[in-house]
Amino acid sequence: MKIMNIDEALLAVNDYHGAYKAALSSEQADKDSFKTNGHERNYVLLAEASRICAALLANPEVMAQVLTSFGISAAGENQNPFGPLVRALFRKEKKGGGTEFNKSCWKFGNILRFIRDEGWKPEEVADQLRSLERPVDGKVKKKLLCAELLDRAKYSHEDDDTRRTNALALQYMLESDGIGVVEGDIEVEDKADGRLITLAASWSAKQGKWIIRAVAVTNNDAVAKAIMPEALKAYEAGSMDLLKRVAQQHIQMNAANLTASETRMFAEMQIGDFVWPVPVPNAAKARSKAKAKDEANAVVA
C-alpha cells in the first residue's frame, strides 16, 4: 500500500475509522458478541492498521499533514511513532462535536510497533497475533497482551529517558522567573510549592487587562502535560546556553554563579578533555557528539 498525498491519506484514515466504529456498534448491540468477538475484531483491525501506518510512516510529509488536520502532535524523540497515528485511527467523537483520543486504544500503539519490529506483513498479522505466546518477565503471556508487554519491555529505557527529561524541564520552568504574576488570591485546595493550575481568562479592551474567569484544570499531571512543550523549549535553550558558558568560562562544579537548575544541568555534563552537550530533547539531542566536541574545543581554544 502506498499513500502519495493528503487526500489519499485522509481517505484511508477515515475509512478505517468508519470501519472501526461500525464494528464496535455491531458488537455493542449484542453483549455476548462483544465479549466473544473483541479479540478477533482487534486482530483484523490491527492488521489493516499496520498497513496504513506503514504507508504513512513511509511518507513523513503527508503523515504530518494528516496529524495536523486532526490537531494531533507528531511523536517526539524517544516517543512511539505509532502513538499519534493510533490517536487518529481510533479517535472517538466528543459530545457537542469534535473528536478526542480513545484512551482504551493506547495499547495499540505498542502492539503496532511490536508488529513492525517483528517484520510481520499485514496479511499475516492476524494469524501471528492469534498464536502469539512468549514469556514476559518469567511468565508466559498470550496474544495482544503479550505483544503489548514485550514492546513496553523493549522500549522501557526510552520511556524512562522521556520521563526523566520531562521532569527536569518542568522543574526548570518552575524555578524560572515566569512570564507574569497573578495579583490576588486564587482558591484551590492544595497550595503546596510547585502546585499547577490552568486559568481561563478573557481580554478586557476597556481595562487593558486579562480578567481571570475560572480555574479550568486543577490536576497537576494534566497541567504539566499541557505546558510540557514550552517547558522543553525553555529547558533546551537554557541547557545549550549553559553549555556555551561552560566552554567559554571553564565553570567548575561548585561555581557560585549557577542556579539550582543550572547545577542539575551541569551534573549532566562530562567535563574533562572535552565538553559534551546536556542530554536534552529534539535539536540539542540530535547533535552528534563529534560535532559538539569540535564546537566546544573551538570555543575553548
Image: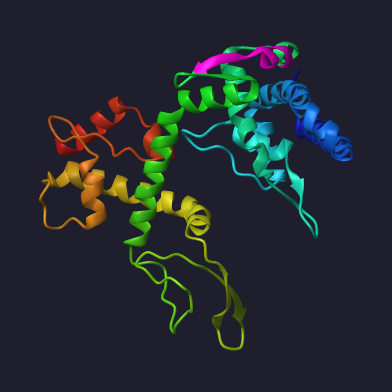
The magenta-colored residue range is 126-135
- The colour scheme is rainbow
Quarter location, residue 158: top left
Looking at this view, is 211 or 142 the one in front?
Answer: 142
Residue 221 among magenta residues:
no
Name the quarter where the C terminus is drawn. Answer: top left
Horizontal relation, residue 38 to residue 291: left or right: right
Quarter location, residue 132: top right
Residue at the bottom extreme?
206
Name the quarter where the N terminus is drawn. Answer: top right
Horizontal relation, residue 55 to residue 166: left or right: right
Looking at this view, is 30 or 164 the one in front?
Answer: 30
- Is the residue 176 above or below the residue 152 in the image? below
Residue 128 among magenta residues:
yes
- Residue 225: where, in percent of width, then height? 51, 52
Dominant secondary structure of the magenta stretch? helix
Q: How many marks?
A: 0
Q: Is residue 15 visible?
A: no
